[in-house]
Amino acid sequence: MGTAVRVSDKLVRDAKLTSVVDNRSVTGQIEHWARIGKCAEENPELPYRLIKEMLIGLEELDQGASSEYSFG
């Protein structure tokens, strides 16, 4: 269940533009940015690209789109 929050008009405008490119809803875009920001604050040593790839990997796991990795 969602909770209503107030955000700036500028954030909503930016999310509208970016959400079209990334094929997300405005809410989904803001949630995506929040997840990345949270991960970046919790792991300041990690570069953005690695954080994004980890979030993609977690989503693949959640959707069952992963396979076992075999070493060697």
Image (spheres, grey):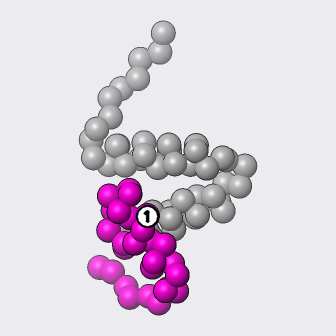
Picture residue at 27% right of the left edge, 46% below the top: 63
Q: Quadrant of residue 43?
A: bottom right
Picture residue at 42% right of the left edge, 42% below the top: 57
Query: Between 2 and 71, which is closer to the camera in this rendering?
Result: 2
Q: Quadrant of the N terminus?
A: bottom left
Q: Is residue 7 left or right of residue 49?
A: left
Picture residue at 43% right of the left edge, 64% below the top: 18
33 magenta-colored: no
On the image, the x and y values in percent for residue 50 come to 58, 43
Residue position marked by numbered label 1 in the rendering: 18
Q: Is residue 52 above or below residue 36?
A: above
Check disc 1 and give the amino acid type. Answer: Thr
On the image, the x and y values in percent for residue 35 come to 50, 63
Query: Between 58 and 48, which is closer to the camera in this rendering?
Result: 48
Q: Is residue 12 left or right of residue 25?
A: right
Magenta region: 1-27
On the image, the x and y values in percent for residue 71 come to 47, 15
Picture residue at 40% right of the left edge, 72% below the top: 16
Which SS class for mark 1?
helix
On the image, the x and y values in percent for residue 30 come to 45, 70
At label 1, counting other C-alpha atoms closer than 10 Å, the crowd grade (few under 14, some 14-19, many 20 or more) is some
16 magenta-colored: yes
